[in-house]
Amino acid sequence: MTMKTLATAALAGLLASGPALAELVIPDLSYRTGPYGANGTPFSDGYQDYFALLNARDGGIGGETIRINECETAYNTEKGVECYEATKGDAPLVYQPLSTGITYQLIPKVAADQIPMHTLGYGRTSAAAGETFPWVFNYPATYWDAASVAVNYLLSENGDDLSGKTIALIYHNSAYGKEPIRTLEELSEKHGFTLTQLPVDPPGQEQKSQWLQIRRDRPDYVIMWGWGVQNQVAIQEAANVGYPMDQFIGNWWAGAEPDVMAAGMAADGYKSLNMNRIQNYPVLDEIRAQVIDAGNGAGDGSNVGTVLYIRGMYTAMLAAEAIAKAQELAGSPQITAAQMRDGMEALEITNARMAELGMEGIGPEFTVSCENHSGSGEGLVQQWNAAEQVWVPLTDFIAPDKSVIDPLIAEDAAAYAAENGITPGCL
Amino acid sequence: MLYREAGDFKTTYAADSQTFPIRSDRWRYFAVLAIAWGVIPFVIDDYWANAILVPFLIYSIAAIGLNILTGYCGQVSLGTGGFMAVGAYSVYKLMTMFPEVSIVVHVILAGGITALVGTAFGLPSLRIKGFYLAVATLAAQFFLVWLFNKVGWFYNYSASGQISAPERFVAGVAVTGANTAPWAQYLICLAFVTVCAIVARNLTRGSVGRKWMAIRDMDIAAEIIGVNPLTAKLSAFAVSSFFIGISGALFFAVYLGAVEVGEAFGIQKSFLVLFMCIIGGLGSIFGSFAGAAFLVLLPVALKVLGVDLLGWPSSTVAHLQLVAVGALIMFFLIKEPHGLAQLWRVTKEKLRLWPFPY
């Protein structure tokens, strides 16, 4: 026991050193290890490199430099909570955990600590109801939007008629993978297709039986809600059972280079959703010149321009724009987490602004308001060209069916508010 | 003088059979209790509660539970994660079904439910032993996780399949939910740990514990001298599962607040608690605490050292941690199979002989 007390005393001394400089602190709950590391690494690189670019090129945002506080979560909720507790004393502006599991964990905590959280296209869909979830933002789109965009794409492929078709959903058996089921069930009723559900236990190295079932049932389409090693295995298994790749559609977390590379040419034609258009943006050259070549990159620079890198950079851009908005609203370059929240709620992303930032057309135009924290919900469909190793955008941004999603969000948010004794309202 | 029997005269039978017969041991024990109850609640903050002390206390209960089964009764179990899940889901169902009943009652009842489930899964231990029993408990682990994922009733049909703890109060102070003060979280766990440790210590010192140890050391010989293997093994499973259920309930309700069964109570959790027992010391209550402290503190200490002080990339430190834990487990299995508790025992023996060792 005495040894333990000594060790804890030593630790207390180590932890006591605090920040003194005036700067904008952004924690990055990243994961570069474990079965999800291949996907977590490029995202985190993009997220950090964009802030590094702002520091190098513009001296930060509004004259304040940005400091990144990285913490490794390994996509594990317990470690995520520990990272949150370890970084929240540093006056962070916004959390961005890149994990639906950690998001669920943090939703009540950020509300209690009054720190905003941005869950870009992941997390709890009903957080779109900003009056119930004032501290959580999931713009530009949610999982229910993703499910609806996928179905709308299939509708357009089939002359607006899906009746009698079967769609299989193969999903990560966790809060993340279960998220779209509610919407897909509703949509299957509306459009008359049959939905089969095939859960894959995380991390998903083992999915032979699910793919045997797909081989037997031959569904018209397979939609995948996967992440990490599950995606690679699924695409390989689909190739093994001879399932046509162009009828296999991943969501926007199941459509990046690490997912398709492992299957080689067999992955050619695999489709996925994306909330970003993948092309060579001028801002990427700036990052290469001013961050990577200067030796300040978060990674070795090999990920620059990949799907998840661009998404990480896009997330950072949205955060930076919200900080600029918050500084404008607060009238000072130093802002608090509460002011950051106001900035996020007043965020407006236009095509003109994205072009100005050197990333024209990277995402949809959207505005955030107190009632709607989820933005426009639009997504596009892209396809993998294995010969040239590029993702080719097949469509423009497709709008989701808000008439189905909005009532579901209202219902789920009301249930959450009732369960937790929250009176919905704008802050 | 440090650590001497000399001068510590026992005048009653009660004094002679007390838990800590040596005076400085007793003093140390009371000092630890005094600091834990009287000092830490006043200085604790969110980070210390959530990252270090609360998980340490909760894992200690789980490690005590597994130590009773594996360390004292010799029955290897890989079902700890599954049994913790039973505790968590029981307390969730009880909390949502009977919101007017105190959370303390619910946690104890959750332990009771887990004891029943544990006993049921302990039945194969009457026929199979060693590795084969480990495989049977592994089946419990996978079956229970599958069950809580599959049957909507257990998670009240929530869309995400997660369970989240509503706010509950003890004496007017919130102990679950996001608005819980760190000291309240800490104190409720400490109360359970204190009671569980005292109960476990006394059980293992009494006739029940001696029966368990007889079964562990040689079950045929134990049967010949009159130990009933049926009651001994099943009572070990029941008591062990009771503690593990309490730890699972606290883990969900007080520590995490929301869990997903596959992730929070997967097979890794079973191994983690088993490693705590191995590194801490099989067959020792102190070892359970030492093992839990070691495995909770090691990642935090490595992170503080590597990331905050040396400025290494966080991924390198995370990889290094995997290497370090693996190496330490091998080291302990080869060099000191009885774990940290044995190191402590050896130190005490040396202290008693000092300064005239022979």
Image (cartoon, coloured by chain):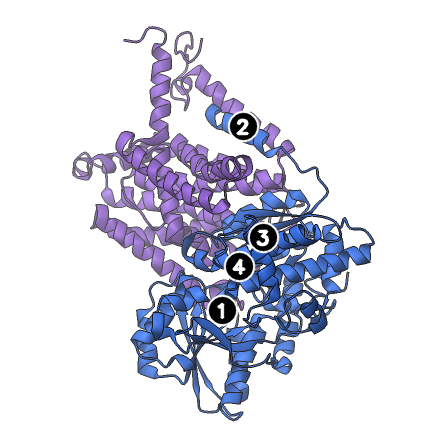
Chain colours: A blue, B purple
Residue B3 sits in quarter: top left
Q: Nearer the viewer, mark 2 or mark 1?
A: 2
Same chain? Circles 2 and 1: yes
How would you rate the neighbour count of disc 2 (Cα within 10 Å): few for under 14, some for 14-19, many for 20 or more? few
**CB under 8 Å between discs 4 and 3:** no
| Residue at mark 2: chain | A
Of residues B285 and A174, the one nearer the viewer is: A174
CA gap between label 4 and label 3 equals 16 Å
Residue bearing the label numbered 2: A10
Label 3 sits on what residue type?
Val
**Residue A149 spot, x, y in % from top left:** 56, 79
What numbered label is drawn on residue A43? 4
Secondary structure at badge 3 equals helix
**Residue B322 placement, left or right of B188:** left
Q: Where is the N terminus of chain B found, in terms of image quarters? A: top left
x and y percent of residue A221 in the render? 42, 82
> Marks 1 and 3: same chain?
yes
Dot 1 corresponds to which residue?
Answer: A178
Quadrant location, the C terminus of chain B? top left
Q: Which of A58 and B116 is in front in this view?
A: A58
Foreground disc of the pair 1, 4: 4
Residues under numbered marks 1 and 3 in contact, where contact means CB atoms less than 8 Å apart: no
Q: Nearer the viewer, residue B215 or A20?
A: A20
Q: Are marks 4 and 3 on the same chain?
A: yes
